[in-house]
Amino acid sequence: MRSALKVLKGEQFASALVLWQKQHGRQHLPWQHTGDAYKVWLSEVMLQQTQVATVLAYYAKFLQAYPTVADLAVAPEQDVMQLWAGLGYYTRARNLHACAKQVVARFGGKFPRVVVELESLPGIGQSTAGAIASLAYGVPAPILDGNVKRVFCRYYGIEGYAEQAPIKKKLWAIAADNVPVAEPGVYNQALMDLGATCCLPRNPVCSACPLMGSCEALRKGMVGQLPTPKPKKPRPELHFISLIVQDEHGRVLLELQTGKGVWQSLWTPPCVACSAQPDTAELFSLVDQWIERYGLANSDVGAKQALCGQMETLHGQPWLVHELTHRKMHFKVLVLTLPGVRGGFYMVDEKPVPKIVHKLMVQVAQLLQSTQGAVAKQNALDF
């Protein structure tokens, strides 16, 4: 066990990080050094659960489309969802839009400086509020995002899952005690940068860390064990049959998801939950539902016959796996082509769709190129 200096707290801790940030921290992210609360807020929302490299392109597109919070507030929701499509965690996009409207309605189009007022806005929690207040306005407000939790847990040797109430309370107390009055924005950016570039979840670069000499986790040989992982719970595994109906122009039958759920306000092909090993009766029941709901019985291509003909090969079709944070989803597809102009058909890039839709289209293309039964015979489709 290595000897170490006493752990730093308060102004000493903050000073070490501010100095490091100025010398080694990231300086060229587009939302830095702007003093613009709108840009800081937009970046903070996008960076929740998403890496910087992915966010950069979306951030630029959003600013181009909506240069100010007032522009975003008056945008149609579907346009906002379309720009967000592919970034995931779509509740963020809905909250983003709702928040912009409230900033305009309640605060005259300017984000408030007070943390509790920021927290009253949709999608802004305590840490995001602290980031906006400190980075945009220089308010000495603490933050505690995932990177910061990791830095604190390792540096102070805090064991226990960080989201458990007693541990979270302890981490917030540390955050509040350490945030400096001078240059709080630089300090908070240092915490985030340290977690993003040195104190990584895996293979941390301890040799580049300004806190290396007094880090409790390093001293105890526990860097790999901290933060304490979340207790594992089995993710529910859900199974679905999706219906891909396309016209001769490549447009696909899509419907808006209006109910509460992971894909609310997005567009998807018809999709029905099924058992992990659906039997023939269950599959035929799904076809009957679709035939009735989408008026396919009146088509000239024998929709029911075509779909039922695919049942023989559906059992042999591999499940397409789509993993989300809290669930694991499995999909199989039935494919149909319908000539003529019909309502509800769109090019996939015309609507905000989740990533699974693109994966389903790839699955269909692969099936059509294979020699699997009736699906392979529908080579008139062009994906």
Image (cartoon, grey):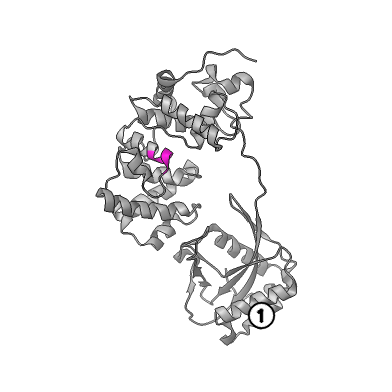
At 58% from the left edge and 65% from the top edge, which residue is drawn? 361
Image location (x, y in percent) of residue 112: 29, 42
Q: Is residue 9 visible?
A: yes
Q: Amino acid at mark 1?
A: Ala
Name the spot of residue 57 as percent of width and height, x first.
Answer: 43, 48
Quarter residue 80 falls in: bottom left
Magenta stretch holds residue 127: yes
For this rendering, which residue is in front, 377 or 200? Answer: 200
Q: Is residue 262 above or below residue 20?
A: below
In this picture, residue 310 sits left or right of residue 294: right
Q: Residues within 10 Å of mark 1 (few under 14, many from 20)?
A: some
Q: Which quarter of the image is occupied by the C terminus?
A: bottom right
291 over 32 or under it: above or below = below
Q: Name the magenta segment's main secondary structure.
A: helix
Location of the N terminus (image quadrant) = top right
- Residue shown at 67%/83% (left/top)? 305
Residues shaded magenta:
125-129
Return the residue at label 1. 306
Please tell me whether residue 370 belongs to the stretch shown in magenta: no
Q: Position of residue 46 (x, y in %)?
A: 44, 46
Single out the residue that lies furthest toward the front: 166
Q: Between residues 254 and 26, which one lies in front from this camera angle?
A: 254
Who's the residue at 36% across and 48% down the image?
Answer: 121
Q: Is residue 68 visible?
A: no
Residue at 57% in and 87% down: 298
